[in-house]
Image (tube, helix red, strand yellow):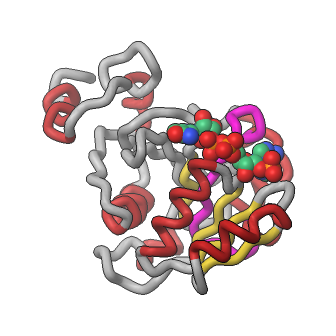
Amino acid sequence: MPIAPSAKPSRRDFLQFAGSAAAFVALAAGPFAALAQTPGAAPIKIATIGAGREGGALGTLFAKAGHPVMFSSRHPEQLKDLVAGVGALAKAGTVAEAVAFGDVVLLVVPYGAVAEIGKEHGKALAAKALILDVSNPIARIAGDDQSALALASRLIKEIGFEPVVVGGLAMGKYLVPGTPLAPVHTPEEIRQIVATLK
Ligand SMILES: NC(=O)c1ccc[n+]([C@@H]2O[C@H](COP(=O)([O-])OP(=O)(O)OC[C@H]3O[C@@H](n4cnc5c(N)ncnc54)[C@H](OP(=O)(O)O)[C@@H]3O)[C@@H](O)[C@H]2O)c1
């Protein structure tokens, strides 16, 4: 999984979904089930931890889809141009400010930084509706929490991708490089491969 076990908040469930060949992780979404509505429902406050190529692009897409977005990094003062380019729905802050801001948090940092972020902010992150982890180039969804999957699916659709749920977390073993679901496939190919897996 993209987050080291020591960094896991206790209530989290994991999922992974398609989007620019990215892998994501979700937290339990019990109190936030209402957020998992169809595309076009009420905006959701989204924070990015990391605002480089991937975080900048995804945050921009979510802002274009109508969601308020706070970009963050260790150097938020360097994000002024990004924020100005995205427009009124965007702002920048520290990682702590972003964690406080977002109902959904995108982790888009180098893989090695994830454990440190989990250690410092794991407790606050555990209270979030959803954590989407892009720190691993995997293009499917897997998760055990249906509300979290629904929320992730809504957000993915809103930025123009087709989510493909491949099953529960046990399917995660087929998402790592070298296993059947790791390469790029069409949604239909993914469904056909999943039907052959246990
Ligand atoms: N680029 C892609 O196409 C792509 C696709 C799929 C997945 N990914 C994955 O997505 C992740 C990000 O990739 P990227 O290409 O966007 O990297 P990037 O352009 O280098 O951006 C990384 C961002 O993370 C921030 N950051 C680094 N360490 C941090 C920390 N400890 N706390 C908070 N922020 C931190 C950096 O800002 P500061 O240094 O200023 O803090 C920067 O904003 C990687 O794990 C990568 O494998 C990337």
Q: Quadrant of the C terminus?
A: top left
Q: Using the image, determine if residue 17 lies above or below residue 89.
A: above
The x, y position of residue 194, in whole percent, is: 22, 29
The x, y position of residue 157, in whole percent, is: 31, 63
The residue sitting at the top extreme is 178
Q: Quadrant of residue 165?
A: top left
- Left or right position of 169 against 12: left
- Left or right position of 130 against 183: right
- Residue under the image location 43 percent in, 72 percent down: 33
Q: Using the image, determine if residue 57 lies above or below residue 86.
A: above
The x, y position of residue 57, in whole percent, is: 53, 57
Q: Using the image, determine if residue 43 lies above or below residue 180.
A: below
- Residue under the image location 76 percent in, 53 percent down: 122
- Residue under the image location 35 percent in, 66 percent down: 154
- Left or right position of 197 against 66: left
Magenta region includes residue 94: no
The residues colored magenta run 99-114
Q: Using the image, determine if residue 95 lies above or below residue 142.
A: below
